[in-house]
Structures are given as C-alpha cells and as structure tokens.
Image (cartoon, rainbow, N blue to C red):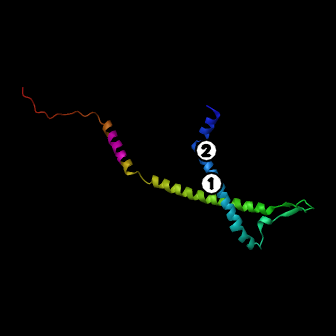
Amino acid sequence: MSFFSEFKSFAMRGNVVDLAVGIIIGGAFGKIVSSFVADVITPPLGILLGGVDFSHLAITLQAAQGDKPAVLLSYGKFLQSIFDFIIIAFAIFSAIKVLNRLRLHEEKKAAAGPTKDQVLLTEIRDLLKEQSQKPEATVTRNDPPTSS
C-alpha cells in the first residue's frame, strides 16, 4: 500500500473527519466568543471599574528611547485572555450539560418500556419455548374403525 493511499484511508476515517469539523467549528466559535468578550462584556466591566480599558493595561519595564519602543508587560491582554477562556469554558460546559440532559432524557424514554414489536416478539419467543419443552404429542386420528 502506498504512502498516499494509507494517508487517504487514515484521513477519510469517520473519527478524523469528525475531529477536523470539530476543530474548524471550535475555531470559529472561539472568534465569536473573543468578540463577545472584547466588544460586549469588557466595556461595561471597564465602566464598572472606573473606565479601565483592560486591553491597554500594561506596566512599563523600560521606557522608549529614541527609535526603540518601550518594553511593556501587557497584563491587560492577559486579563482579556483569561476572560475569553472563562467564557469559552462556561459556554462549553453549558452546551455539554444541555446535551447530557437531552441524552439522559432519551435514555429514560428508551428504558421506559418495550415497544409493541418487542412485546409481540417476547410473546412469540415464550410460546416457542413452551412448545419445545413439551413432550412430543401423539397424534390421534379420528378415523372410523374398520370392521374386519
């Protein structure tokens, strides 16, 4: 088997394709959450904290000198990343919780009782068991007696 045919069979397996789709959707979801945090949550939080804009928070380690820019410790960007992570983790947790609840509901519904087909098949099975456990019945004929 050639290298490319092995790679093709590997890449086309269901798990790999599902994983790729999940990563792409996760990347897009990450952008949405980052925008939500940066554009919706952080501004009101900054107002509540006295007009602080987190993305510009930094400690100057070395001042700018001539053409050299200042060396900054941008902890505001780090705080922004922490908020992004917390919101993404909360969103994923919430989604998984909803999915688990739906799955549990489906499992309870499935375990609630047998379907009509299952009941019928169970009855047929039981009848067949009964018949197989009985001794062979002798067949009696109701032929009129012959006179000799």
Q: How many other residues sit within 10 Å of disc 1, few (<14), some (14-19) or many (≥20)?
A: few
Q: Position of residue 119 (x, y in %)?
A: 37, 49
| Residue under numbered circle 1 | 25
Q: Where is residue 4 in the image (x, y as percent from the top left)?
A: 63, 36
Disc assigned to residue 41: none
Q: To which quarter of the image does residue 76 belong? A: bottom right
Q: Earlier in the sequence, mark 1 or mark 2?
A: 2
Q: How many other residues sit within 10 Å of disc 2, few (<14), some (14-19) or many (≥20)?
A: few
Q: Give the range drawn in magenta.
A: 120-129
Q: Position of residue 102 (x, y in %)?
A: 53, 57
Q: Where is residue 56 in the image (x, y as percent from the top left)?
A: 80, 65
Up-down: is 48 above or below 82?
below
Which residue extends farthest right?
66
Up-down: is 148 above or below 39?
above
Q: Residue at x 63, y 57 (%)?
A: 92
Q: Which residue is drawn at 67% across and 59% down?
A: 31
Q: To which quarter of the image does residue 5 belong? A: top right
Q: In the displayed structure, does residue 141 sit left or right of residue 107? A: left
Q: Quadrant of the C terminus?
A: top left
User: What amino acid is found at the position of numbered circle 2 in the picture?
Assistant: Val
Q: Residue at x 57, y 44 (%)?
A: 14
Disc assigned to residue 16: 2
Q: Main secondary structure of the magenta part?
A: helix
Q: In which quarter of the image is the N terminus?
A: top right
Count all numbered tags in the image, as a single digit.
Answer: 2
- Whether residue 121 appears in this view of the structure is yes
